């Protein structure tokens, strides 16, 4: 039996929550004899077959991790820690954490104080105890091995894929987005997403290409989102910008400046990227 920290499936709308929900859906689609123990505080409502067993505990951190690890040590052959490094401190079975980024170690990206402190305290021991590590990008793997050299030999890069939901042909584009296609970036609007670097890379494209395929950044507002959105918008000369909560999915015209078309959108509508834009 494989144990999975599945708390994010119900506790996080995006980010790690999306990863866990897509992972469970993909595992459910496999035709195999493996069984899965899903550790969480609340059961996700999506239908899963008899191979999946929810093991629920409403305890708060850090007690939740102690109890989940104790149960996994008794019943699981291995454990995927998709939401925290702390659980690995108490696991005796082979465990694999997912490493999304090392923003907590980069003060320039202004990580959330509490979350950043927890990650800085828990990751070093997790690296030593992990049987393997999953990094969601080569950049993350490189940053991980640079800070923790012993991680290099046991890190595997597993890039995140686009959800099948994006393949729908009947999704409506937010107002203001051209039908000719656009460059789409999806992520919570906050400093850790490094929007200024995205915009800097986009500005290196030929001006004519920018005019035909504007940059659209879409996501819910997050930690220090207003500053992150304003920085990205002003650095590209945005024609569209918003830092409002994701209610309408529309783009709001801003008087930031006139320049290469760009967009920062709050998302409830689901933009459909043009295949030619990659």
Image (tube, rainbow, N blue to C red):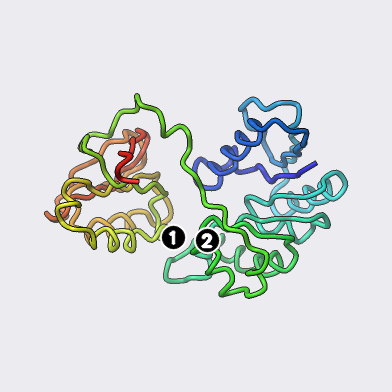
- Which residue is pictured at 44% across the width and 60% down the height? 192
Whether pointer 1 and pointer 2 mark residues with C-beta atoms closer than 8 Å, the reply is yes
> Quick one: label 1, few (<14), some, or many (20+) residues within 10 Å?
many
- Which residue is pictured at 30% across the width and 42% down the height? 276
* Mark 2: secondary structure: loop
Residue 238, numbered circle:
none
The number of callouts visible is 2
Mark 1 or mark 2: which comes first in sequence? 2
User: Residue placed farthest to the left in the image?
Assistant: 258
**Displayed quadrant of residue 40:** top right
**Displayed quadrant of residue 197:** bottom left
Residue 53 relative to residue 148: left or right: right
The residue wearing badge 1 is 192
* Mark 1: secondary structure: helix
**Location of residue 35 with respect to 242 vertically, above or below:** above
| The N terminus, quarter of image | top right
Question: Residue 65: where, in percent of width, then height?
Answer: 74, 52
Question: Residue 26: where, in percent of width, then height?
Answer: 61, 36
Per the model, the C-alpha gap separating discs 1 and 2 is 9 Å
The residue wearing badge 2 is 101
**Location of residue 169 with respect to 62 vertically, above or below:** above
Question: Residue 249: where, in percent of width, then height?
Answer: 32, 35
- Which residue is pictured at 25% across the width and 40% down the height? 181
């Amino acid at each position: 039996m494989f144990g999975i920290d599945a708390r994010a499936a119900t506790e996080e709308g995006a980010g790690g929550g999306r990863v866990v929900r897509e992972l469970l859906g993909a595992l459910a689609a496999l035709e195999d004899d493996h069984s899965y123990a899903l550790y969480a505080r609340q059961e996700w409502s999506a239908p899963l077959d008899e191979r999946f067993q929810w093991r629920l505990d409403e305890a708060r951190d850090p007690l939740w991790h102690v109890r989940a690890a104790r149960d996994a040590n008794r019943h699981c052959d291995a454990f995927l820690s998709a939401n925290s490094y702390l659980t690995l401190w108490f696991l005796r079975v082979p465990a694999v954490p997912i490493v999304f980024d090392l923003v907590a170690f980069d003060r320039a990206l202004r990580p959330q104080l509490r979350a950043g402190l927890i990650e800085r305290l828990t990751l070093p021991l997790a690296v030593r105890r992990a049987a393997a590590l999953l990094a969601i990008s080569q950049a993350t793997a490189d940053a991980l091995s640079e800070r923790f050299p012993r991680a290099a030999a046991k890190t595997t890069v597993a890039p995140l894929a686009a959800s099948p939901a994006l393949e729908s042909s009947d999704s409506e584009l937010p107002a203001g987005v051209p039908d000719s296609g656009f460059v789409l970036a999806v992520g919570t609007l906050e400093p850790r997403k490094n929007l200024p670097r995205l915009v800097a890379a986009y500005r290196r494209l030929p001006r004519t290409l920018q005019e035909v395929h504007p940059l659209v950044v879409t996501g819910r507002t997050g930690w220090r989102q207003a500053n992150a959105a304003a920085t990205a918008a002003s650095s590209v000369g945005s024609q569209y910008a918003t830092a409002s909560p994701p209610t309408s999915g529309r783009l709001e015209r801003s008087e930031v400046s006139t320049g290469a078309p760009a967009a920062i959108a709050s998302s409830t509508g689901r933009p459909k990227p043009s295949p030619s834009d990659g």
